[in-house]
Image: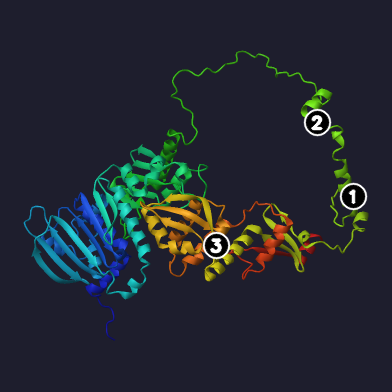
């Protein structure tokens, strides 16, 4: 039998490695920007076209590479940062595995132009699918210019899995932000289809955050600084007023490298306990300076997941540091022990007798007993008999009405036998509300219980979907149009779904500087906070990776229905309950909400009988 195990060709092995390192165009931006930072550049320009599908180009003024180094950089595991295994535990640079350029060259057309600072001429290398097509000497400026064209051209299946241009552009902006916030000492530029998105000169950390997130965050930033033998923590956290419904302004950096750490995120959230609602996210930009020997950054190809040697201690230090910063800036009530002067606190000496204060008053005093006072205040004569007619009419109604209010104290067994069994009642009297949340009504099989909020959510959802199909959702013009600002990432998203928002009845128009003016909202949502609603739409879009062409309308309908439905504690009249139930049973799927939660539950006759055995 012939041998079946064989070595993979280098081109295939590189494509497999590329699947781990290069997931989408944003991965290119991250890897190339990190290489530029490691090269000592103080100015980096990133250019993308068609959200990175056609071109991702990174130009830097770093140290550049020689002809030999330029060629070697595209070999797998070729790196200048590691000489032996022990070097892995002292890494402070961004890239170190030597996988990025080899992986990129395996799935794209790559052109590298580079020159060392002390060299007269540079090198130009052109590679396609791991194959070197040309290498020549050329005149160029110092540093590197690396252009990646036609990503995944040789792997059509991977290319088809890329999302829309707007979605890929958002991921690129996200990766760009992670790098530039950690490196305010570098001048960064970002261009998309020849349009300038970011122009970030050298600044301090706070100014870089404001330039990225927006001016509105400047009043919500609180500095944090903790210095221990285990870790040094610096950066900024947000005030509780700056918390949002949407995630996105939460950044952890360890040794100037962005990281994701759900465990430490809980430390931040715990520090804000009882200061913000549970469904909101406080912004934070926190930098950890740790001995490289105490962390492991080699547990994931993207190097965003980092393991600390003593995570529990760092959790406690971070949580305490945030609480201290919130207290210093009077966000959390605290006692100021540094107040100038002395506080005079009386001290009881011995055991003096303390008696409560005594107030003299006349319990029989009647302010209207004086005829002059009656005339002065306009009190009518015989005012005590004003309600006599009302009470007699109420008693007559109770005696003649078929519906009787029963209580365990006033009714005995002999009275129960005299109650009528067949009572004709109007339709509204069949509905009862419990805790301003549930609607009860008798049915043939038992007792039906309806969640009023979920029922209204289903009604609104199907109404929105029906209106979309007929293109007839009405818009309610706002008396005072609202102006709302978003960061660049969210602005790209709003621009992408702007037409769909208009179909739903939003009258929204973009202005300059990532600002939008809202002139109208859907009729059913005229009493809600527009900014909060748009934040929830953005969060839904981000968290679920919605395909804008096929799923966005249904997702928008779900968000709008959930936002516009009744509150759980809203009192309903019998007429309101009757209308709500009738509309619910005209829906196509009355039993469940759009997200699959139960609306109707029936307490069967058999269960009722068991209860009273």
Q: Count neighbours of disc 3 (C-alpha within 10 A) and say few if under 14, some if 14 to 19, many if 20 or more.
A: some
Q: Which badge, 3 or 2, comes first in the chain's sequence?
A: 2
* Position of residue 489 measured from the top left corner of the image (x, y, whole percent): 37, 56
Q: Quadrant of the N terminus?
A: bottom left
Residue 195: quarter of image: bottom left
Task: Determine the secondary structure under disc 2.
Answer: loop
Q: Which badge, 2 or 1, comes first in the chain's sequence?
A: 2
Residues at marks 2 and 1, CA–CA distance in whole angstroms? 29 Å
* Position of residue 367 measured from the top left corner of the image (x, y, whole percent): 79, 25
Residues at marks 3 and 2, CA–CA distance in whole angstroms? 52 Å
Task: Determine the secondary structure under disc 3.
Answer: loop
Residue 426, placed above or below residue 44: below
Q: Can residue 54 be seen in this view?
A: yes
Circle 1/circle 3 CB separation < 8 Å: no
Identify which residue is drawn at 35% across, 42% down. Answer: 235
Identify which residue is drawn at 34% across, 61% down. Answer: 169
| Horizontal relation, residue 194 to residue 360: left or right | left
| Horizontal relation, residue 171 to residue 31: left or right | right
Residues at marks 1 and 3, CA–CA distance in whole angstroms? 49 Å
Residue 409, placed above or below residue 448: above
Label 3 belongs to which residue?
Answer: 474
Label 2 belongs to which residue?
Answer: 379
Q: Count neighbours of disc 1 (C-alpha within 10 A) and say few if under 14, some if 14 to 19, many if 20 or more.
A: few
Label 1 belongs to which residue?
Answer: 396
Residue 513, placed above or below residue 600: above
Identify which residue is drawn at 90% across, 50% down. Answer: 396
Task: Determine the secondary structure under disc 1.
Answer: helix
Q: Count neighbours of disc 2 (C-alpha within 10 A) and say few if under 14, some if 14 to 19, many if 20 or more.
A: few
Q: In which quarter of the image is the C terminus?
A: bottom right
Q: Is residue 411 visible?
A: no
Residue 444, placed above or below residue 331: below
Q: Which residue lies furthest to the bottom in this view?
A: 1
């Amino acid at each position: 039998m012939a041998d079946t195990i064989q070595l993979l060709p280098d081109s295939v092995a590189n494509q497999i490695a590329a699947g781990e390192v290069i997931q989408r165009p944003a991965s290119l931006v991250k890897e190339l920007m990190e290489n530029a930072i490691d090269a000592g550049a103080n100015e980096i320009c990133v250019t993308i076209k068609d959200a990175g599908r056609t071109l991702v180009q990174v130009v830097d003024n770093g140290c550049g590479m020689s002809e030999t180094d330029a060629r070697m950089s595209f070999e797998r595991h070729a790196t200048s940062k590691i000489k032996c295994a022990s070097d892995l535990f002292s890494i402070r640079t961004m890239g170190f595995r030597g996988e990025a350029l080899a992986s990129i060259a395996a799935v794209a057309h790559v052109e590298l132009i580079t020159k060392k600072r002390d060299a007269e001429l540079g090198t130009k290398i052109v590679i396609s699918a791991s194959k070197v097509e040309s290498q020549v000497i050329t005149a160029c400026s110092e540093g590197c210019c690396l252009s990646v064209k036609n990503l995944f051209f040789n792997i059509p299946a991977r290319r088809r899995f890329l999302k829309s241009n707007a979605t890929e552009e958002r991921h690129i902006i996200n990766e760009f932000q992670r790098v530039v916030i950690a490196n305010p000492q570098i001048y960064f530029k970002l261009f998309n289809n020849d349009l300038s998105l970011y122009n970030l000169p050298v600044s301090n950390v706070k100014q870089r955050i404001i330039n990225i997130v927006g001016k509105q965050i400047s009043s919500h930033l609180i500095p944090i600084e903790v210095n221990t033998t285990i870790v040094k923590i610096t950066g900024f956290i947000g005030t509780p007023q700056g918390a949002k419904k949407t995630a996105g302004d939460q950044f952890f950096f360890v040794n100037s490298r962005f990281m994701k750490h759900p465990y430490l995120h809980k430390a931040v959230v715990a520090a804000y306990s009882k200061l913000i609602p549970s469904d909101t996210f406080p912004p934070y930009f926190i930098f950890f300076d740790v001995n490289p020997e105490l962390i492991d950054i080699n547990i994931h190809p993207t190097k965003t997941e980092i393991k600390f040697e003593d995570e529990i201690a760092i959790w406690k230090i971070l949580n305490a540091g945030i609480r201290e910063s919130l207290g210093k800036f009077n966000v959390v009530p605290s006692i100021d022990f540094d107040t100038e002067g002395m506080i005079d606190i009386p001290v009881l000496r011995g055991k003096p007798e303390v008696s409560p204060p005594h107030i003299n008053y006349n319990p029989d005093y009647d302010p209207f007993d004086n005829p002059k006072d009656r005339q002065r205040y306009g009190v009518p004569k015989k005012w005590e008999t004003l309600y006599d007619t009302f009470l007699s009419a109420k008693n007559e109604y109770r005696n003649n009405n078929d519906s009787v209010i029963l209580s365990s104290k006033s009714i005995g067994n002999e009275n129960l036998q005299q109650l009528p069994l067949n009572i004709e009642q109007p339709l509204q009297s069949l509905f009862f509300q419990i805790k301003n949340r549930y609607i009860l009504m008798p049915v043939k099989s038992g007792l039906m219980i309806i969640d009023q909020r979920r029922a209204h959510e289903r009604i609104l959802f199907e109404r929105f979907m029906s209106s979309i199909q007929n293109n007839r959702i009405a818009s309610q013009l706002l008396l005072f149009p609202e102006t709302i600002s978003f960061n660049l990432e969210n602005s790209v998203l709003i621009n992408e779904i702007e037409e769909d928002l208009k179909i739903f009845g939003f009258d929204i128009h973009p202005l300059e500087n990532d600002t939008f003016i809202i002139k109208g909202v859907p009729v059913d949502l005229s009493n809600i906070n527009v900014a909060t609603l748009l934040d929830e739409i953005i969060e839904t879009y981000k968290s679920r990776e919605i395909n804008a062409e096929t799923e966005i309308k249904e997702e928008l309908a779900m968000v709008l229905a959930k936002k516009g439905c009744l509150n759980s504690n809203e009192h309903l009249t019998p007429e309101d309950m009757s209308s709500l139930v009738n509309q619910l049973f005209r829906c196509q799927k009355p039993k469940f909400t759009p997200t699959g939660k139960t609306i109707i539950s029936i307490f069967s006759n058999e269960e009722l009988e068991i209860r009273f055995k």
